[in-house]
Image (cartoon, grey):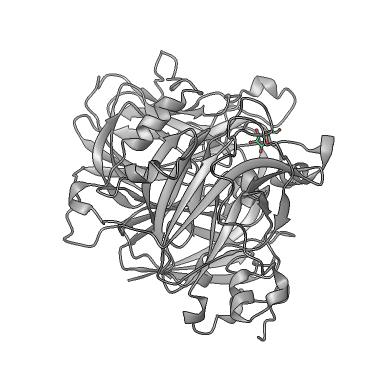
Amino acid sequence: KVHHHKWEISYQFKSPDCLKKLAVTINGQTPGPTIYATEGDTVVIEVKNSLLIENVAIHWHGIRQIGTPWMDGTEGVTQCPILPGDTFVYRFLVDQAGTYIYHAHYGMQRSAGLNGMIVVKVPDGFKEPFTYDREHSILLNDWWHNSTYEQAAGLALPGKQFTWVGEPHSLLINGRGKFNCSLNVGGTCNSTNPECAPYMLTVVPGKTYRLRIASVTSLSALNFEIEGHSLTVVEADGHYVDPFVVKNLNIYSGETYSVILKADQDTTRNYWLASNVVSRKPGTPTGTGILHYYGVPRGRLPTNAPPVGPLWNDTMYRFNQSVAIHAHPSFIESPPSKSDRMINLLNTQNRVNGVMRWSINNVSFDLPHTPYLIALKDNLNHVFEQRSPPDTYDVKSYDIFIPPVNPNATRSNSIYKLEYGSVVDVILQNANTLTANNSETHPWHLHGHDFWVLGYGLGKFDPESDPKRYNLKNPILKNTVVVHPLGWTAIRFKADNPGVWAFHCHIESHFFMGMGIVFEEGVEKLGQLPKFIMGCGESKLGN
Ligand SMILES: O=C1O[C@H]([C@@H](O)CO)C(O)=C1O
């Protein structure tokens, strides 16, 4: 089956947290419409860019784009941006049931509001390893009142002019939050605006629900809780997991989960849905919604305060939840037992010519203006640096517990070329930032593949002993994985999807500040590239 969608992207005034702000919308909405399809279907989205003076590109996060690498929607990597007034038609196969998201992948545009969910159902007759009566989708986000231009410009300024984006003003649940309007006297905040009425999840007593939960936050790691109810985690990034019960779910930007919720508590009251910042010192109030028991007046708020989540700096709590996730016993896809190449990536915060950057093995990533896919196919070798970035750093002696001894890094747009069909291990190592006694959480997202999560550690990765402890028995497959503060995460994937694929921290400001790399594999296997992805930089429309 082919699903056709017609989207117009435009700026509109929106009040998701009660304060009026220009937001990038899809057909006037933010979040955008949910895309529904069944495994094996084709989705066609005709995107018209009606932003007045801004380009756009849309990434289908978690969709592997096997055979259609030019549909990945990553500006600078797989396509030229869509110019104002132009229309671009995305067309791709959804080959794997599960919960996915879409969002802008151009500059820091995602945080302006261009995001939404993709729900891919299992084919008729397929039995999932759990049952439920109904399903609902919950999209979590963080939200700022200043524009993404202001944010991006501030991050690019040198020295003291550097302006960090700061903690979000609000947390949104399905595009709804509540800013405290008394802090905006004389402004445009209106707490009675129906646009910021809390999201209400209505449940019928005794019924069972599948909640598809996704995070498109620009910065925040979140903890999601439904007051008084436990959640059974059953899916992560499109893969069934061995079910496990949590009081609340830590969810990092770019991740998706399905949880099972039973409406089995006191049916004479309503309960809070709560989204709290974890892993950074919170500066944002709890984002709330309502779990509404059918029969209770909709407007009746719980009289108690909403849940505040775990301690924000309880890394162990989050680490333990990460390691609790395993593949479902009936759906184990075993990883190859060995890898052909090991890439050790050290994540550090640095300065390059006075500008604050993030780097990987001391290389801070810059996107070129000619998309790699086109440059590689057309042998435009001069449009990006041809020297490969380093596969490793001084793993043995680098001290991750102190600010970098050499705070300088270089900027480069060089890429990693992978042998087609080879098995690649990547070990991501977090270190101390430029500030003493500080290390951050980074969710890394790989385009074009799912990878096995072989292991997590806190502290320094030991290349001798840690690989011996890798989970090769029932590792989960994911497209986004967290690296905990001062910790490491090891993943394995097969480089078998011809194309060029970004791999980066899903914190939007961090990728903007250089925290990412790009893999190339098997581009020579691709036929002629479609012309409509071309026309920018040195890629000529007529090529
Ligand atoms: O990239 C970042 O910069 C700031 C801070 O380190 C400098 O202001 C921060 O918290 C980040 O995550």
| Residue closer to the observer: 333 or 186 | 333
Q: Position of residue 365 (x, y in %)?
A: 66, 55
On the image, which quarter does residue 191 sit in? top right
Q: Is residue 34 left or right of residue 46?
A: left
Q: Position of residue 500 (x, y in %)?
A: 54, 68
| Residue closer to the observer: 135 or 246 | 246
| Residue closer to the observer: 124 or 313 | 313
On the image, which quarter does residue 529 sit in? bottom right
Find ligand 1 in the image and state its quadrant. Answer: top right
Q: Residue at x 63, y 41 (%)?
A: 348
Res. 90 in view: no
Q: Position of residue 119 (x, y in %)?
A: 36, 54
Q: Position of residue 263 (x, y in %)?
A: 24, 30
Task: Quarter of the image for the N terminus: give it.
Answer: bottom left
**Count of marks placed on residues:** 0
On the image, which quarter does residue 534 sit in? bottom right
